[in-house]
Image (cartoon, grey):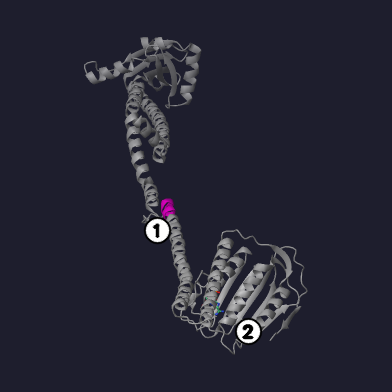
Amino acid sequence: MLAAERFRRISRSLGFRLTLSYVLFFTVMLAVLGVMFRQILSSRLETNLREVLDADWSAMKGYIKIEGGKVDWDYDSKDDDERFSVERLKRIYLVADGKGKVLESSDWYNLIGVESPAEIQQLVRAGAKSQDQGIFRYKWDPETGGQVMLRGGVVFANDRIHEAYFVSIGRTFQQNNQLLRNFTRIYLALMPFMILAGSMLGWSLAGRSLRPVTDVAEAAERISGSNLGLRIPDRGAGDQLDHLIQTFNRMVARLDGSFRQIRQFSTDVSHELRTPITAIRGQLEVALFTAKNTEQYREAIENSLQDIDRLSQIVRALLLLAQSESGQIELQRSPLDLSKVVGDLIDQFQIPAEEGGVTLSVDLPQECRAEMDRVQIERLISNLVSNAIKFTPSGGSVHVRVRRDGDAVEIEVTDSGCGMEREHLSHIFDRFYRVPNEQPSPERGLGLGLSFVAWIVKAHGGTINVDSEPGRGSRFVVRLPAGRGVIPESQGAEISEHVG
Ligand code: ADP
């Protein structure tokens, strides 16, 4: 049962499937190569046989003398080499005169089949034309059950052109076939070993190349919320696996960042909530133990209520932010005139601006049609403008500008206030982030306003940019798509309206 389970797991593994396809491919390749080698060997052997027959022919011409229809084999019968050569030549041979009459032929040649006189005459004519190239033919040999190769040609009696004889000698393919059979047998016997060696190599290669995948899986298993600093080392090969490792590492880094933010957020929230709670507790305790009259009790209760207000403000803001970021708050887009919305809002900010000694001015087109969520846009502008007023000392100025730019609208809030160092700009949109050591401000914010701004901009599919210089002021530029059903505005209709 266990072994079966183990086999099932292995057979499903990527390494096994890779090796299997590799082995199948390797086997087919080996078979194709075997057939190809055999074919090459066979044609090489055939060429050899032709060359041997050519050499036989030259030797034969040295031994044979034909004149007046008589064939004479002239050789030294005491010389073993010569005798052997002639005997070899005479195994498959035929001599005929120009008219096709057979003068001499070996038994073997007779068995293969002697050509008819007409055929021989035709061969003589062809032989005379081919000079000494020879006419090669293949015939079936009943003796060996295979083919024989015959080389025919014309021999002249004492170089007399009119007395031509046809001579044909042959050799069997026996030896060639034997060689080919041996080759096939050895190749087939070696094939299983080659396949086995190939499979082992394939298995180890697949294992080695899939090793990083297993590493990634193991590392992923080890990663939890507490050790997100873990990274898989890059192999430096620059291949797809390295790409996978890098992507995985980047993903973990992003997760790490998010976890850090969440931890930071929890710390910040508890800190933010603890401060007013401690204050309330302190005030109530002091009142309980030391207050002597109603006035003192009243004062303590009033102070506590202020802190409770701040507490519920934080809780409300956090709840709203959580709802908006988790997609629970849907945008209620409707056609609106952004010039009017911004104009009305700025009117409301005139009093706080005046109180802070800040000049608030606005530059709006006559009409700026857009399709947006009015409540959220008002919240966005309120946050930017209230920040600008809050962080601008008395005598400074805040300027708000709305502008149409093609299919988009641009809202720009510029102030001449305290500004910020560059390093803070990427953090001010984070929850609870407040620039440390800022100019003391009468109102301590929650550090949540710009988080809302960022969400509203994102939900509307827009962008926000901030430029700031310490001591010289800041500029927030929000760019939002105007949305559908926009009434085109007349060009150059912008008017400048300064309020306050
Ligand atoms: P807060 O409630 O503190 O204003 P925000 O999220 O609106 O929170 O802003 C985050 C921080 O960014 C602020 O505490 C302040 O340090 C900085 N900031 C925002 N707007 C301005 C500005 N116009 N000028 C200078 N600093 C700014």
Task: Inspect this view and state whether residue 371 appears.
Answer: yes
Tag 2 residue? 353
Tag 1–tag 2 contact (CB < 8 Å)? no
Q: Taking 129 as reference, is 265 above or below it?
A: below
Ligand 1 lies in quarter: bottom right
Q: Nearer the viewer, mark 1 or mark 2?
A: 2
Residue pushed farthest bottom? 395
Residue pushed farthest front? 293
- The picture places residue 127, in percent across and down from the top left corner, at 46, 22
Mark 1 and mark 2 lie on one chain; the one further toward the N terminus is: 1
Image disc number at residue 228: 1
Per the rendered image, the range of residues in magenta is: 239-245
* Towards the viewer: 81 or 70: 81
- The picture places residue 220, in percent across and down from the top left corner, at 40, 51
Image-quadrant location for residue 38: top left
- Quarter of the figure that contains the C terminus: bottom right
Q: Is residue 156 magenta?
A: no
* Kind of residue sitting beneath label 1: Leu
Q: Taking 324 as reference, is 136 above or below it?
A: above
- Secondary structure beneath dot 1 equals loop
In the image, what residue occupies the spot 64% across and 82% down? 399
Task: Inspect this view and state whether residue 26 appears.
Answer: no
Local packing at callout 2 (Cα closer than 10 Å; few below 14, some 14-19, many 20+) is: many
* Towards the viewer: 267 or 184: 267
* Kind of residue sitting beneath label 2: Ala
* Towards the viewer: 8 or 19: 8
- Quarter of the figure that contains the N terminus: top left
Q: Is residue 243 magenta?
A: yes
Q: Taking 431 as reference, is 287 above or below it?
A: below
Q: Disc 1 to disc 2, how far (Cα)? A: 47 Å
